[in-house]
Amino acid sequence: MIAALFSGGKDSTLAVHKAHQEGKTVELLVTMSPEDAYSYMFHKPGIQFTPLQAEAMGIKQVMAITKGEKEEELADLERVLRGNNVTELFTGAVASSYQKSRIDAICSRLGIVVHSPLWHIDPMEELNELASKFNVIVTQVAAEGFDESFLGARIDGRMIEKLMRLKDKYQINPLFEGGEAESFVLDAPLFRKRIKIISARSVWEGQVGRYVIEKAELVEKDV
């Protein structure tokens, strides 16, 4: 079975898109839901709304709870992959050797072929593709230079310009690989419907700002 490690963010959603461009049909979305908001491996903001994305793409999803504890969460992922007879796995790994090396090791043990189509992608290439074909919003910020204007904002041309300025001033990674921010996808080329946010709120805790989606639903795409 061809699966994708799916968090609902920009990278994992784009990886599914790339898989289909390569002629691979992703049959299963594997979503790990960490109890710890600061999991080393897995994305948490908006994870409860990933079933809407799965439904929009018409792809089966399996969601597994993990405590999100360092290294132990890897055993949780391994059990899910083994239990669902995954033979190929697409990941949204971009630059984190910590994450990629551990996923690669798990898949090697299980005989799973790993595909990481975004690995070391040029940031501008990814951002421009997202801005032109996807509707991606920022759901969390946690780095110097980011303010409330980013929360709930779409990654578009204006956002890219702001990110480039922050990159020059603060040396951030514009794809958020340093944990600068998190994202959530509302629409994508593979989506048959789009996600509409009904209610949400912005909250700040110390240096971390979150755009908390409270209610969302699938609606028909605009013609």
Image (spheres, rainbow, N blue to C red):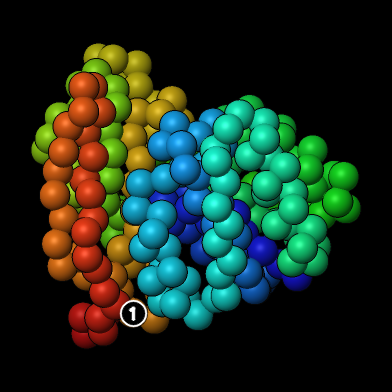
Asked if residue 15 can be seen in this view, the reply is no
**Residue at point 55% right, 61% down?**
63
Asked if residue 49 can be seen in this view, the reply is yes
> Which quadrant of the rendered structure holds the C terminus?
bottom left
Callout 1 secondary element: loop
**Residue at point 18% right, 42% down?**
151
Provide the residue designation for mark 1. Answer: 193
Residue 212 position within the rendered picture, expressed as x and y whole percent measured from the top left: 23, 49
Q: Quadrant of residue 97?
A: top right
> Which quadrant of the rendered structure holds the N terminus?
bottom right
| Count of numbered labels shown in the rendering | 1
Q: Is residue 135 above or below residue 143?
A: below
State left or right for residue 121 relative to residue 117.
left
Residue 70 position within the rendered picture, expressed as x and y whole percent measured from the top left: 61, 29
Dot 1: within a 10 Å radius of its alpha carbon, few (fewer than 14), some, or many (20 or more) residues? many
State left or right for residue 65 relative to residue 187.
right
16 and 74: which is toward the camera? 74
70 and 162: which is toward the camera? 70
Residue 209 position within the rendered picture, expressed as x and y whole percent measured from the top left: 21, 33
Q: Amino acid at mark 1?
A: Lys
120 and 110: which is toward the camera? 110
Q: Is residue 13 above or below residue 92?
A: below
State left or right for residue 138 relative to residue 158.
right
**Residue at point 72% right, 42% down?**
75
Residue 108 position within the rendered picture, expressed as x and y whole percent measured from the top left: 85, 44
Q: Is residue 175 above or below residue 64?
A: above
**Residue at point 50% right, 34% down?**
39
